[in-house]
Image: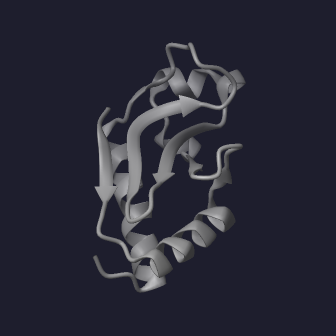
Amino acid sequence: MRSYVIDEVQPFDMARIRNFLTDRAIPSELGDIFWIPIPDDLLNESQYQHRQCRPHVLAVELGKTWVRMECYVRSLKGMRCECQAYCTRQQILFLLNFAHAMLDELGIKT
């Protein structure tokens, strides 16, 4: 899986990241997984056409001292659809901007 990892995060900062994601992402039923919705204008053609599969999201997993953001677009409606795929360049940029904005807003240095 292609992903973006932020590691060597202090436990206190991990709690702050968890709170940030709870407020700005979609929490999953699994406590350490969050979903970042992708804006409609960043969806590829297949994803845009598949309105029934929305929201299209990116997964964020939290560990004890790391954050892993997958570069794979998923649907919360089902597991098997052609609209799920690796990120486009614009979607990767959206993911990186989200991650860096989160760290900047929280004042976290890694």
Q: How many marks?
A: 0
The residue shown at (31%, 82%) is: 109
Percent position (x, y) of residue 38?
A: 54, 45
Percent position (x, y) of residue 61?
A: 48, 50
Q: In front: 86, or 88?
A: 86
Q: Quadrant of the rendered structure where residue 90 is?
A: top left
Furthest toward the bottom, the residue is: 107
The residue shown at (56%, 13%) is: 80
Percent position (x, y) of residue 70?
A: 40, 42
Does residue 107 lie above or below 21 as drawn?
below
The residue shown at (37%, 35%) is: 87
Q: How is the image coloured?
A: one colour
- Quadrant of the image for the C terminus? bottom left
Percent position (x, y) of residue 89?
A: 29, 41
Does residue 7 lie above or below 108 as drawn?
above
Q: In front: 19, or 50?
A: 19
Left or right for 28, reference 95: right
- Quadrant of the image for the N terminus? top left
Left or right for 85, reference 55: left
Q: In front: 56, or 16?
A: 16
The residue shown at (59%, 21%) is: 49
